[in-house]
Amino acid sequence: MKLYSAPGTCATAMHIVLEWIGKPYEVEHLDFAGMKSPEYLKLNPQGVVPTFVDQDGPLAEGLAILLRLVDQNPEAGVGPATGEAGRDEMYQWLAYLSATLHPFFWPYFMPGRYHADDAQHGAVRQAAQERVDVALTVIDQHLEGKDWMLGEQKSVVDAFLYPMAGWAYGFDKPTSAYPNVDRVIRQLAADPAVQAVHAAQGTKAKVDVSQDAAA
């Protein structure tokens, strides 16, 4: 199994899940030039990460990769198998993270895609933060009374939430303002598998979990 990733992107989620699965895998971190190289474009013509390659061939799109990892590794318990309780809910939340929350960040990080006038980029970023707030509020309310997104056991849904919620810690209304989301992100940041992913990426968690451990 091989994952093409870039530090800090949503591909971090697939990297985390591969660590949870515990089977041999390889990760190649790409910069922008690497994503546009002829070799990589043969695997992913969009020239973006993530791309996952295994015996079934290359697969792009984080949601699709996470579902393949669940289905091909049922013994790992990283998500409900077909026919099990929670399978439809896993579909729902993976779709929500992929198609709703994730796109709300694009105007914040790349406002030039949405308005040609530089003077309007601040307003574009503000609007993006407002949309992220709506989505994180929905997720926070869903997490009330739950350990993880699907209940008592962590899953690919939590792994997918981890990088996206991390991006908002620097927002005007930071991720820490959503207590249930913040709790899940802190739980994950303390996970040895997640810490191994950060070490491999050369990145750090957006939260300081040393205080949590001391408490």
Image (spheres, helix red, strand yellow):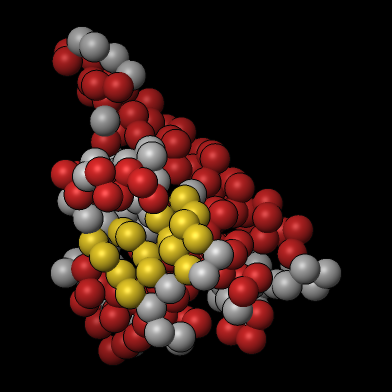
- Residue in the picture at 37% in, 58% down: 11
- In the displayed structure, would residue 20 be above or below residue 61? below
Q: Nearer the viewer, residue 215 or 9?
A: 9
Farthest right residue? Answer: 83
- In the displayed structure, would residue 3 be above or below residue 50? below
**One can see residue 182 in this view:** no
Residue 168 image position (x, y, % from top left)? 33, 49
Give the left or right position of residue 202, taking residue 104 as reference. left
- Residue in the picture at 76% in, 58% down: 88
Q: Quadrant of the N terminus?
A: bottom left
Farthest top residue? Answer: 117
**One can see residue 21 in this view:** yes
- In the displayed structure, would residue 9 be above or below residue 209? above
Q: Would you identify the image quadrant in which residue 199 lies?
A: bottom left
Residue 59 image position (x, y, % from top left)? 49, 55
Residue 191 image position (x, y, % from top left)? 39, 82
Q: Would you identify the image quadrant in which residue 119 lies?
A: top left
* Number of numbered markers: 0
